[in-house]
Amino acid sequence: LVFQATLVAIITWQICYALRQNLDTEQTSTGYPWTTGRPKTTTGYPWTTGRPKPTTGYPWTTARPTRTTGYPMSSTVHPRTTTTAASKYPCSEFTVGNCYIDYDSLLWSSSQVHDNDLCQYTCSNFMHCLLFRQTDSYCQLLRDDFRPNCKIVGGPVDGSIAECVNSNTDGCNGMLEEDCYYNGRNLGLDPPAGEVVTAYECEALCHGFKELGCRYWVFDADRESCQLLASSSRRCYGLSGPHYPELSDC
């Protein structure tokens, strides 16, 4: 009995040893998932750390593509220089300056906008914007016409301040330059300060002196002065007008 038990133990140990050897051989020949490290994948995103760069443009690239259309990418350079020339919009020859802006009329103002076209475009997107006003330092949008309250007004000899400055806010005739330096030659016909006290009187005086060369007049209400000039040549640093038509069409 002792011999038989010993023989069974030896056979059992040999069988277990053979099975253990076979298991070790299988673990050595096979890889993942029994090995410690995972195999590296040969594919890219999303397993790799860095994402692949797309081959298309915007919106992934930093810079947006340049638009080939017009405004608002186009710009208008300040200041505007005007010389005497025939115009199919006679009111556009009128100018204003030293204007008072009522706070209640002001819809919006920005010192970041320095472009006439952009200021007008902004006005076209405001429901209650009657006029845009662009100066060398800011853009303003207004619900009321401020031009009749300006202290300085200038106009051509054959113009009408009543029709242009005090009533017209439509179309190209509603575009008025502002804050101007007048380069026209002074005719030496200016009346003494205080003798002409309204813009209407200054306009009438220039018309009376038309044969003597008066082509443009400038009235300053604070000084009660009336300048009579040989041309409308000027350099202006502001512009106001309606949201339509576009400035390029005027």
Image (cartoon, helix red, strand yellow):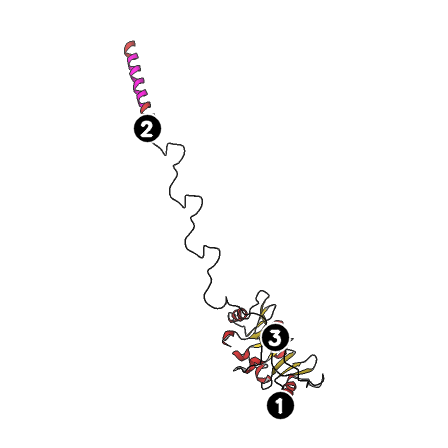
Which stretch is magenta? Answer: 6-19
Crowding near pointer 1: few (<14 within 10 Å), some, many (20+)? few
Q: Nearer the viewer, residue 132 or 219?
A: 219
Q: Nearer the viewer, residue 55 or 246?
A: 55
- The answer to whether residue 247 is visible is yes
Residue 72 inside the magenta-drawn segment: no
Which marked residue is nearer to the observer: mark 2 or mark 1? 1
Tell me which amino acid carries mark 3. Answer: Arg
Q: Which residue is mark 3?
A: 235
Q: Which residue is mark 1?
A: 211
Residue 111's spot in the image, x, y percent?
Answer: 60, 65
Q: Secondary structure at mark 2?
A: helix
Q: What type of secondary structure mainly makes up the magenta span?
A: helix
Disc with the residue nearer the chain's start (3 vs 1)? 1
Residue 8 inside the magenta-drawn segment: yes
Q: Is residue 2 left or right of residue 64?
A: left
How far apart are the two marked residues, 3 and 2, measured between alpha carbons?
94 Å
Q: Name which residue lies at 62% across and 71% down.
A: 103
Residue 31's spot in the image, x, y percent?
Answer: 35, 33
| Residues tagged 3 and 2 counted as in contact (Cβ below 8 A) | no
Disc with the residue nearer the chain's start (3 vs 2)? 2
Disc with the residue nearer the chain's start (2 vs 1)? 2
How far apart are the two marked residues, 2 and 1, measured between alpha carbons?
117 Å
Crowding near pointer 3: few (<14 within 10 Å), some, many (20+)? some
Q: Which residue is mark 2?
A: 26
The quarter of the displayed image where residue 192 is located: bottom right
Q: Name which residue lies at 57% across and 82% down.
A: 164
Q: Nearer the viewer, residue 152 or 85?
A: 85
Q: Secondary structure at mark 1?
A: helix
Residue 141's spot in the image, x, y percent?
Answer: 57, 71
